[in-house]
Image (spheres, rainbow, N blue to C red):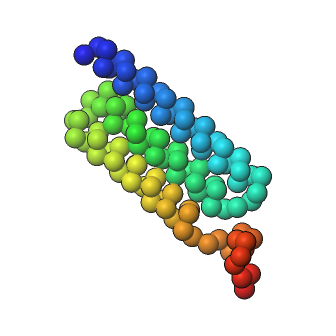
Amino acid sequence: MADLSTLLLAFDALVVALGVAVAWLAFGAFRRTGLQGLRLVAFAVALVALGAVLPGVTYLATGASPVASMLAGSVVTTVGFVALSYSLYAEYSDDPPAPGRNAG
């Protein structure tokens, strides 16, 4: 059991590290290009990464039930995916038009 706990902790740390890295890259792309959707992508990726590790943290830190802990993680992950979907779908008024699309 201790081996599985160590493995779970290692993968949760990897999820956080990769989530932070991708969010940082997306935010850097936003700052470089000014495209508003990239800022929301950064936020969404951070939420998805948080949702992946939140159940374990909630369970261990607060003593909440496993089901409540998993529900908290699922809610945060869902909000992250909704934000990610919106960031990819929405058209922002201050962004330049995409190539091949009319400006008006």
In the image, residue 80 lies at what x, y percent? 46, 53
Relative to 29, is 14 above or below? above
Judge whether residue 62 can be spotted in this image: no
The residue depicted at 72 percent of the width and 82 percent of the height is 102
**Tag count in the figure?**
0
**Residue 65, position as x, y percentages in the image:** 22, 35
Furthest residue toward top: 2
Q: Is there any visible trace of residue 5 in the rendered image?
A: yes
Most extreme residue toward the bottom, as rendered?
104
Query: Can you give x and y, in whole percent of width and height, for residue 82 in the image?
Result: 45, 60
Q: Is residue 91 left or right of residue 52?
A: right
Tell me: residue 25, above or below residue 32.
above
- Residue at the location (53% across, 39% down)? 19
95 vs 3: above or below: below
Write down the quadrant of residue 25 in the picture.
Answer: top right
Please indicate whether residue 93 sits to the left or right of residue 50 in the image.
right
Question: Which residue: 74% across, 52% down?
Answer: 31
**Residue ranking furthest to the right:** 32
- The residue at 64%/48% (across/down) is 26
Q: Quadrant of the N terminus?
A: top left
